[in-house]
Amino acid sequence: MPRPLVGACDRAAAIVACVLVVALLGVVTLGVVTRALGEPLIWTDEGSRFLMVWLAVFGWVLASRKRVHVRIRYFQDKLTPRLHRAVEIAWEVSLVAFGVLVTGYGVALVIRNHDLEATSLPISMAWMYVPMVLAGLVTALQAASEVVEAWRGHVPPHSALPGAADIE
C-alpha cells in the first residue's frame, strides 16, 4: 500500500479513536446525570459497552501500527544478530496467524449475531463484533509487513522502536 494512503489510514484511525473517546465520555456522563435526576436513560449502559469495545479495538490498531504494544525483548536482545532475526520472524509469523484467527472468528461472530438486536438500542449485536474483524486484519497485515522487513534484515534494535525511550 502506498505510504500516503497508509498515513491517511493511520490519521483516520487516530481521529476515530478521539471521536470514540469523546462519545464514550458523553454517553457515560449522560447516564450518570440522568440517574442523578431520577430519570435514567436505559440505553446509556449498552451504548457505553459498544463504544468501549470499538475504542479498545481502535487502541489496539493504533498500538499495532506504532509498534508500541508491550513486548519484552530482554532475552531476544541478548541473541546473536542472526538468531535475533530468526526469533523476530517467528514472532511476526505467529502474529500473522493470530490476526488471521481473530479475523475469522470476528467474521463468524458478525454472521452469527447479525439478526440479533441489542437489548436497549435499535442496532444489531453484530456491531459489537465488527471491530474485531478490523483489528485482526490490521494485526495480520502489520505483522506480515514486519516479516518482510525482518526477512530483508531490517529489524530495528529496541532503542530505535517508537516509544522505546518512554519505556526505559
Image (tube, rainbow, N blue to C red):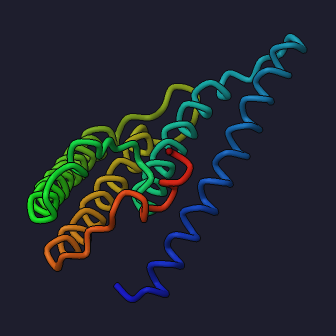
Q: Residue at x 48, y 61 (%)?
A: 162
Question: Residue 35 appears at what percent x and percent y?
Answer: 81, 15
Q: Residue 112 lies in what quarter of the image?
A: top left
Q: Residue at x 53, y 54 (%)?
A: 165
Count of labels shown?
Answer: 0
Q: Nearer the viewer, residue 53 or 148?
A: 148
Q: Residue at x 80, y 30 (%)?
A: 30
In this rendering, the answer to whether 35 lies above or below 62 is above
Q: Nearer the viewer, residue 143 or 116?
A: 143
Instruction: State the quadrant of the N terminus.
Output: bottom left
Q: Nearer the viewer, residue 144 or 101?
A: 144
Q: Nearer the viewer, residue 48 or 84?
A: 84
Question: Residue 63 appears at what percent x and percent y?
Answer: 46, 53
In this rendering, the answer to whether 2 lies above or below 134 is below
Question: Residue 168 appears at what percent x and percent y?
Answer: 50, 45
Q: Residue 128 lies in what quarter of the image?
A: top left
In this rendering, the answer to whether 113 lies above or below 8 is above
Residue 22 located left or right of residue 128: right
Q: Residue at x 13, y 74 (%)?
A: 151
